[in-house]
């Protein structure tokens, strides 16, 4: 469920006009943050729904769960995949985050997902530093042109758009300050796909 959909739902339940400032107060964030998240079509989290329930004295989760299936995904709190020059920090520390399956592109119970953190600005404005990335783990499928992947190349980890061009892979950043790179056929053995980015949870900062 997106922020603007939540505003509409609360307005209908309370039979009153709920504005961005009121929702911001209920979630403990600024009105500008709410506005930005509406522009970015940001999804609401379960914990935010719970805050809104308490603030407006409503029952929202029960009705939403009937329409929006919730799944719990491993969130590696100390894993940072670089959207810049290439780096990643691995850690076994993880927690479970409740995620609406409606926000995950191509969601399937048969696929493996995890959540990591984005670091750097090469994929701005699509992905910003501090965003959480939902990764659909690679299972041998072909690279889908112009989709965003987490991958390892030459012992460095990246979050970039990938495209195929005959016998090479094109690596693109959304930030025009970063140049397009290629992986030649002779170097493809050094490329290891971790997974495809299927959703982004925008940072509140």
Image (tube, rainbow, N blue to C red):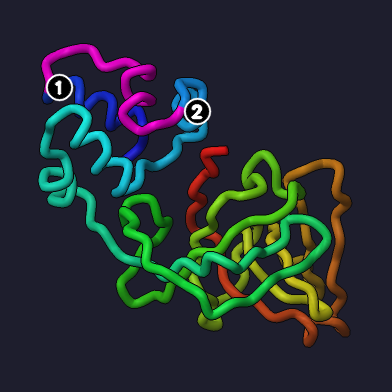
Q: Using residue 190 as the reference point, say whether residue 148 is left or right of it.
A: left
Tell me where residue 174 appears, x and y as whole percent.
Answer: 73, 46
Residue 181 circle label? none
- Residue 52, located in which quarter of the rendered image? top left
The residue wearing badge 2 is 33
Tell me the SS state at disc 2. Answer: helix
* Magenta residues (range): 14-29
Tell me where residue 145 appears, x and y as whole percent.
Answer: 64, 60
Whether residue 98 is visible here, answered yes or no, is: yes
Residues at badges 1 and 2 in contact (C-beta under 8 Å)?
no
Tell me where residue 63 appears, x and y as whole percent.
Answer: 11, 43
Q: Nearer the viewer, residue 26 or 41?
A: 26
Q: Quadrant of the C terminus?
A: top right
Distance (Cα) linking label 1 and label 2: 23 Å
Q: Residue at coordinates 62% horizontally, 58% vertically from top-left?
A: 148
**Label 2 Cα crowd, 10 Å radius (few <14 / some 14-19 / many 20+):** some
The residue wearing badge 1 is 12
Q: Quadrant of the N terminus?
A: top left
Tell me where residue 28 appears, x and y as whole percent.
Answer: 39, 32
């Amino acid at each position: 469920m997106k922020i603007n959909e939540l505003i509409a739902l609360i307005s209908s339940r309370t039979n009153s006009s709920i504005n961005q400032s009121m929702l911001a107060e209920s979630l403990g964030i600024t009105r500008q943050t709410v506005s930005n998240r509406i522009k970015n079509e940001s999804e609401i989290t379960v914990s935010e729904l719970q805050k809104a329930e308490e603030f407006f004295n409503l029952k929202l989760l029960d009705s939403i769960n009937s329409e929006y299936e919730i799944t719990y995904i491993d969130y590696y709190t100390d894993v940072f995949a670089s959207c810049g020059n290439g780096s990643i920090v691995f850690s076994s520390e993880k927690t479970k985050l409740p995620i609406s399956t409606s926000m995950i592109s191509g969601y399937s119970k048969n696929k493996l997902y995890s959540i990591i953190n984005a670091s750097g600005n090469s994929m701005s404005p699509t992905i910003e530093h501090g965003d959480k990335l939902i990764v659909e783990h690679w299972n041998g499928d072909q690279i889908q042109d112009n989709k965003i992947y987490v991958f390892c190349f030459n012992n460095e980890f990246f979050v970039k758009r990938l495209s195929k061009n005959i016998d090479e892979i094109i690596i693109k950043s959304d930030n025009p300050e970063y140049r397009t790179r290629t992986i030649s056929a002779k170097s493809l053995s050094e490329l290891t796909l971790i997974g495809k980015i299927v959703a982004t949870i925008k940072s509140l900062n």
